[in-house]
Image (tube, helix red, strand yellow):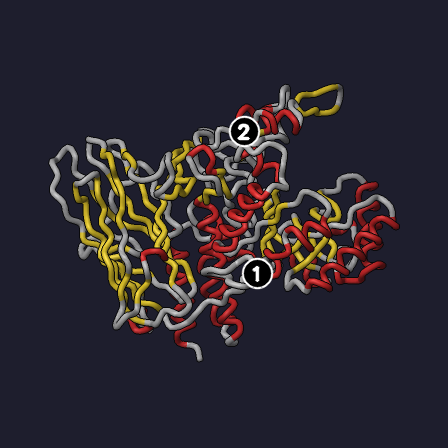
Amino acid sequence: MRLAAIGLLTLLVSCSGSFGAESAASIWCVGESTKVMPSDPPQDKTVVWDGASKTVKLGSARNEYVAFQIAVRTGKDPLSGVTVEPAALKGSGNAEIPAANIDLFVEHYLNVTVSSRSDANGLIKQCKAGEHPTQMVPFNAKKYGAPFEIKGERSNAVWVDIYVPEGAAPGVYKGAFKVKAGEAALGTVNVELEVWSFTLPHETHFHSFLYTGPENLRWGHHMGSDWTSDTFKALEDRYFQMAHQHRTNFNPSGGGIVDEIGKRYAKYYDGSAFTERVGKGVGQNVICASPEGDTKEAIQTNAKAIVAMLEEKKFPAFTFGYIWDEPHSQEDFDTSKQRCKWVHEAVGKKLRTFIATPQWQKYEAGDVDVYSEPSIADIPKIIERGDSVWAVNGGYGAGPYVDAPGYGGRSIVWMSWKMNLVGWQFWDCCYWVDKQNRKHKEGRRWRPDMTYAQINAEPEKYLTDLWNDPLNFDESRKKGYPMNDAIRINGDGLLYYPGHDIGIEGPIASFALKSLRRGAQDYEYLWLLKQKGKDGDAKAVVDSVCPEAGKWNDDPEAWDKARLKLAEMLSAAK
């Protein structure tokens, strides 16, 4: 079936403007899973771009974000005052996708000098050194926003998000984006948007658990030690809202879990906080509510209080208690097993137990409800005996790191579907102070170089230089730690950047977050096909980008082609 027959979103791009040989600029466009690197030459042909006709071809469901990137490459001379001016997209009659539904971002680049690695020899093979587009800076940012400068003989990209409303009528919408350098016209991007006839649900069926401590937001936005003020709660809300629009969860926790979830964050789990665009009226789909304590009485009392709160609130979320993180000794395994048993005795399976360990054989079937970190070979065995598995961090895919490929976040989500995983956990999403590694050794123990009180007082002294240094997790920062054993990762535990230093008191999305959203939306395509009994037919499409568990197609355009094939199948399905 030809894509044109099911309604293809088409962006017609015509570039105009007269420049001398030294200052000529070229414009082209790429899709969501391709990174535009500074050395990239203009492209005549990609899966979304035909240079001869200056045409971009994309597709969009309703209630979906569709994105593309406008790349500009300079000649020998730099360009200043570069910007893009969008316009509303007008359809037949009075139909319109307003300019307010179009969000533009300058892609800010970070130079990776040490590619991500688990130690000196354990390089993460798909992670490469060099400059990578990392932060998505809103045009209105005081620093790094638009208009912006591009140095000579360099490529830079603008990210374009178009939100297609759920009520948009299928058909063609037209508008024009102007690309300018000061008052000089670099080109015009003529947009023809033809919307597909199916609609993505407001519910998100991909589960993510993205923890952070409220202290990270306080430090990143220089807000002292108070996390109870209305100002801080408003800041926190901006992070929840951004996460929701990217079909991910935001799971901060500062303690006192029953009141925290049942009161402070209740509106984010019942959906009342979300009133616009994707996920309107739908709450977050994952709750981590861990019963605190070291004794049977304390753990069971807290487990019962958590379940009572959940039953009262009726939050429609996958809920678990994080019982133990990476047990090592036999005592750890025995204690964590006992705690899971206490929870099950008190509340049954109303509160799932979650343990992060590859050593699942230390437990019997049913002892632990959810595991993370098992090997790929072990996952089918765990599922077969009735327990569940979550991906963690790299997610058996290309990873959400700064130096990962553009499809990195997307691959995590597709691999989750491929491997029958229940969800994905990133150990943090706002890891802006490398407190795990800024330590020194006293005897046999590593001691922190700073206290929370010191960071509260002078956050700028301890924050990673996030707008220049991508290496935010680096064990070599530990004084005396052997370099050959050091884990060094660019963008580890990091999906959001604090906008404080660029004039925005709110989150700045990463490229990885955009990639995760693309994957989460693709997941909805697969979910819809499953509801129509077509998941068997979709298997070949999944296999085209995830041929085996833990192995993926390294062609960014293959991921876009796979999504278009799913769209064909949905449009043809009854």
Task: Give the residue type that dot 2 points to.
Answer: Leu
Real-space CA distance between mark 1 and mark 2, rounded to the nearest whole angstrom: 34 Å
Specify the quadrant that holds the C terminus: bottom left
Image check: 201 left or right of 72?
right
Q: Residue 117: x and y, percent?
A: 54, 35
User: Eyeballing the image, is 157 above or below 95?
Assistant: above
Whether residue 236 is visible, yes or no, is yes
Name the residue: 35% across, 54% down. 102
Name the residue: 48% across, 48% down. 513
Residue furthest out toward the front: 230
Residue nearest the observer in this picture, 509 or 353:
509
The label number, if any, that marks residue 463 in the structure image: 2
Specify the quadrant that holds the N terminus: bottom left
Q: Residue 276: x and y, percent?
A: 47, 60
Residue furthest out toward the bottom: 574
The label number, if any, that marks residue 405 in the structure image: none
User: Eyeballing the image, is 68 above or below 445?
Assistant: below
Q: Secondary structure at mark 1?
A: loop
Whether residue 484 is visible, yes or no, is no
Q: Quadrant of residue 231?
A: top right
**Badge 1 or badge 2: first in the primary sequence:** 1
Residue nearest the observer in this picture, 506 or 393:
506
User: Eyeballing the image, is 524 above or below 354?
Assistant: below
Q: Which residue is mark 1?
A: 272
Residue nearest the observer in this picture, 267 or 299:
267
